[in-house]
Image (tube, grey):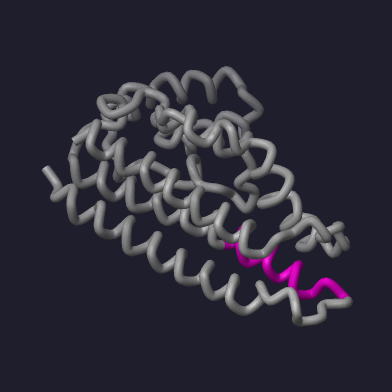
Amino acid sequence: MPDINRYFDVIDAARTRRARELSEIKHKFGDDRVPDPTGVNSKAVAVLTYANWEGFYNECVRIYVQFLTECGKKVRETDWMLLVGAFVRDFEALRARNHSNHAKRQFVSDLKARLECGFESFDCATIEARSNLNFERLAQNYLTLNFDITALQRFRIRIDTELVGWRHSVAHGDSPNLSALDVADHVSFAARLLILVADSFQSAMVDRS
């Protein structure tokens, strides 16, 4: 079995690094006395804060999959729904061949081998953010991971409206109304979410070790 403390330390180190980045964002852009007539500072906060949210989540995914790989268990023995990530190429082959009878037979023919695979065959992209870590995407990933999303549920609207929505508007060249953006509060909110995400992955490591 892998050294679970080592993986905990890697997640904690990644979160600490992100927390420092968020603190620097708060320091540089949180002074209300600095004029910001074009809203550039607020836009920068929205984009950089989201980047830390998505980036840390994806780091946790990769660390977690490394942990599961080192555990040496088959995907189906760990969490049944994670087989979605083991069947990515098979699903793509079905679609590429328009779900023909031949493609379906090939899919079934390969099924036994896929059911016996380990995490060396797992596609992390299945449970990564894909540049849009809104609550729906997070909930879908948590279902696949068999994680409990209860602790994040009450932040659903704020995640979608502020953390993700503001960033998407800025990234797409729009000028969202960021008059309600409190830099210190926004950054602290993101930092709190990082703790909850870290807890999800670390708890799963304990349960699956």
Coordinates of residue 207 in the picture (x, y in percent): 24, 31
Quadrant showing the N terminus = top left
Q: Can residue 22 be seen by looking at this rendering? A: yes
Residue occupying the point 54% across, 61% down? 52
Please indicate whether residue 198 sits to the left or right of residue 3 in the image: right
Coordinates of residue 45 in the picture (x, y in percent): 68, 67
Above or below, 139 relative to 25: above
Out of 15 and 85, give the one closest to the viewer: 15
Above or below, 22 relative to 28: above
Please indicate whether residue 142 sits to the left or right of residue 9 in the image: right
Residue occupying the point 68% across, 76% down? 31
**Which contiguous range is marked in magenta?**
38-51
Q: Main secondary structure of the magenta part?
A: helix
* Residue 188 found in image quarter: bottom right
Quadrant showing the C terminus = top left
Residue occupying the point 38% across, 26% down? 110
Please indicate whether residue 174 sits to the left or right of residue 166 in the image: right
Please indicate whether residue 66 sits to the left or right of residue 187 in the image: left
Is 52 part of what is drawn in magenta?
Answer: no
Residue at the extreme left of the image, as rendered: 1
Coordinates of residue 35 in the picture (x, y in percent): 81, 81
Residue at the extreme front of the image, as rendered: 33
Q: Can residue 93 be seen by looking at this rendering? A: no
